[in-house]
Amino acid sequence: MFHGDFNNTGTIIKFIFRRERVISTIWILSLALFSMVIAPAMADMFPDAASRNQFAAAFNNPMIVAMMGPIYGADNYTAGAMYGGLMLVWYAIAVAVMNIFFVVRHTRADEQAGRVEVVRSLPTGRLANLNATMISAVILNFILGLLTGLGLAVVGVESMDFAGSMIYGAATASIGIVFASITAIFSQLSSNSGMASGMSFASIGVFYMIRAAGDMQGIEIVSCISPLGLVLRSQAYVANNIWPSLLLLLIAFGLSVVAYKLNSMRDMGQGFIAAKPGRATASPLLHSSFGLAWRLLRMPLIIWTIVMLSLGASYASVVGEIDSFISDSPEYMTILGVPVDQLPNLSQADQTKMIVESFGIFVTLMMTLVAMVPLLNAVLKIRTEEREGRTENVLTRAVPRCTYMAGYVILAYAASVVFQFVTAISLYGTAAYVAGDSNPFVLSELLQSFFAFLPALWIMIGFTVLVVGLIPKATVIVWAYFGIVTFTSFIGRLVFTGNLEFLMNITPLHFVSQPEPLKDYVINYTPLIVMTAIAAAMTIAGIVSFRKRDMVW
């Protein structure tokens, strides 16, 4: 059926790896190193069986199981069982994201940009590009799984043996290949790269919800319908099951066959889901640079607004039970920033209030980190449009470069305010619905807490604008810096504060005044004003640099 359709696949594979030598290397090394850092840190936080058993008992409830997955090996809850149970689902999601970007980049995006058509004009098979992409994805996931497994095996954590580590690595590789196959199908169904990416990312959410429903109800068959649920059945460091990885690879093979068949049936540049016909004439809004930026960013920003609302609601939904969830686990209270040493001196009511307020502070920080992702993407859209050659078409008309760039930047700054506002409203509203008159949150204090992080968000936006304007080919620096900010703001301050003090001093969140439980929130406005000024300076410098430099592809 596919005779001759794979000609010159090997040549395209070489071309793909030539293009991916930086991006994929960063992805793989970052994920593997993340595992190697977190595993010993988690073991140090829970050094004995008693602390781990307390943790397992506190987490073994339907709400937490829905979020994290089932607790395996609770009767002998080793550091390996804890790490494998808590980290695998989130690690799998990160690997899925890597594969979605990879497959879309080399299939639908390349086809949309005309690169596949150029390749097909040479003596290559009809399916050679898709085949090369899938083979490359398998190789990359194999390397990632191998490095992850070997890395976990050599960190020296007791109970994280070689066999369990390689099972963890195999699960990592297999889930990545499954999502590469899923993305390959969506790349055939959709008519553009945005739709392919959106449908692929939506599949992660759908599979996560299916897994959560199955795990929460204890229905194994429902959980295993989802690849994210199936991969957890590997039970790394507990049962060390290899069959989930083998089954995932079999599923990936079947999905890949479907993707190949779809690719062989459709015309170049077309998708099975036809693109919506455009208007005969542009709307008045598109007559301006700001209108163009809004047209390109409106759907991602609307979707992320809904995501922030949903996340805020999900966090607030457990606020009434958070005290019972973590009160028996001093380690988890440390993660949330609860001053454990002060609890014995407080009444039961004040202890509960301190835990709930600490949880609110923790959520504020986490949601601010989540909000950074769409804001950075909004500014980086400038670089995407430039790289795809569309910016040049706009600027050939009477459109000032500063005005063009300012449209995206203004939307990013405005979105930062909207995200913080809707998250605070969602937290307060959901907590009020769940807790009624005993709502622990005060709306004015929540808004004050979230808005205090705005200058930190603006620093991230300003830094991104500066990178796009000054060194457009090095936008990966933006995500590297975001990784440092995330690590030091969350993991670093909990585990490696002393060693990473110098990193914390270059992250904007470190300079935002944090509320203290049972105390009035007093904001130090000086660093916020300084950060706002720095953000403004970087933004202006980035726009000026963009105006002066040449277009870069």
Image: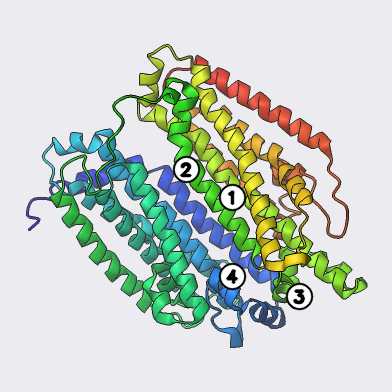
Q: Amino acid at mark 3?
A: Ser
Mark 1–mark 2 Cα distance, whole angstroms, equals 14 Å
Q: Residue 243 versus residue 522: which sits nearer the camera?
A: 522
Q: Are marks 1 and 2 in contact (CB under 8 Å)?
A: no
Residue displayed at 32% across by 41% down: 18
- Which residue is labeled 1 in the image? 370
Q: Are marks 2 and 4 in contact (CB under 8 Å)?
A: no
Mark 3–mark 4 Cα distance, whole angstroms, equals 31 Å
**The C terminus sits in image quarter:** top left
Q: Amino acid at mark 2?
A: Pro
Q: Secondary structure at mark 2?
A: helix
Q: Secondary structure at mark 3?
A: loop
Q: Residue 473 versus residue 330: which sits nearer the camera?
A: 330
Mark 1–mark 3 Cα distance, whole angstroms, equals 26 Å
Q: Amino acid at mark 4?
A: Gly
Whether residue 57 is visible to the viewer of this picture, yes or no, is yes
Q: Are marks 3 and 4 in contact (CB under 8 Å)?
A: no
**The N terminus sits in image quarter:** bottom left
Q: How dense is the environment of label 3, judged by Cα within 10 Å: few (below 14), some, or many (20 and up)?
A: some
Tag nearer the camera, 3 or 2: 2
Residue 297 in the image, given as x and y percentages of width and height: 47, 36
**Disc number for residue 327:** 3
Q: Earlier in the sequence, mark 1 or mark 4?
A: 4
**Disc number for residue 156:** 4
Q: Are marks 3 and 2 in contact (CB under 8 Å)?
A: no
Q: Amino acid at mark 1?
A: Val
Mark 1–mark 4 Cα distance, whole angstroms, equals 32 Å
**Disc number for residue 300:** 2
**Quarter assignment of residue 33:** bottom right
Residue displayed at 30% across by 58% down: 181
